[in-house]
Image (cartoon, rainbow, N blue to C red):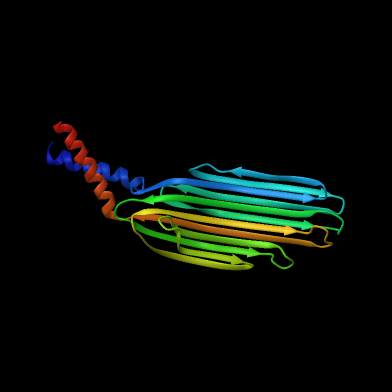
Amino acid sequence: MTRAAMMSGLIATAGAVSALHAGVTEDAVDRYNLTFAEGGFDVDGPNSTNGPASGAWLDDNFSSAVMSGNGSSSNGYQDSYVNNGAYGGYVDARADAFGDGSDFASAYGESNLTVDFTLGAGGGDWTLEGYVNAFGEINGEVSEAYIELIDLSDNSVIWGAFVSDDFVTFDEGGSLAAGSYRIEANALTIVNRTFEDSFGDSTATVDFDFTVTPAPGSVALLAFGGLGCAARRRRS
């Protein structure tokens, strides 16, 4: 093989690898919206919708139940994306319930996005920006939102934000060694007005963009590795 041909193959290989965010692979993806509603003896759910393992997903899961003076409704909404080395979206849950004190009235809404990924030799850098928002904990409602970056080798939290009846923005980043990691965002709302003469509602949201950029050396190593394999095949 001539030097020109060798360099041409190397450049082509490196270009293809870069385009695919070489060194970052998804090991598992879990996306779902879950809702439940109860008003008297009228029940809707639990209803669950699961998203695909890659690409974009837009879903609005809804449950509603009303009987006499008792009722509730809940939403699990998600507009998310899973690409190689880039994950994020809008993960949102809402719930409300009203009762006249005579019967059941409760609602549950949850939305979740979890991606397990492996970062290859050389490691890389990560960035994470967005906000977490949760409101409604006044009369016993549950309103929680969190996002975490986890090292799966020991399940330690590298960075995370959790709110309950609060709003927090974030713009974070750092470096990761080669290994397996998880990015998870979850919004949860629960309202219970069973045998209560009152109304309650709650909302929770995680809006984020997360990227992993492999170290430049990892792309070159993969390219040279592919070139070496090709050379060995030619010699055999």
Image height of 128 relative to 15, above or below: below
| Side of 186 where 212 appears, left or right | left
The C terminus appears in which quarter of the rendering? Answer: top left
- Disc tally is 0
Q: In percent of the image, x 67 and y 53: which residue is there?
A: 109
> Residue 19: x and y, percent?
35, 46
At horizontal 82% and vertical 47% (from top left) the residue drawn is 41
Q: Which residue is found at the position 61% from the left and 48% from the top?
A: 33
| Quarter of the rendering occupied by the N terminus | top left
| Nearer-the-camera pick, 187 or 9 | 187
Where residue 93 sits, quadrant-wise, is: bottom right
223 relative to 157, above or below: above
Residue at the extreme front: 154
Q: Give the image quarter of residue 225.
A: top left
Relative to 119, is 7 above or below? above
Report the residue that reaches farthest toward the top: 236
The picture places residue 184, in percent across and down from the top left corner, at: 51, 55
Q: Position of residue 97 (x, y in %)?
A: 77, 57
Q: Residue at x 55, y 47 (%)?
A: 31
Comparing 120 with 230, the one in front is: 120
Q: Position of residue 148 (x, y in %)?
A: 49, 60
Name the outermost residue toward the left: 2
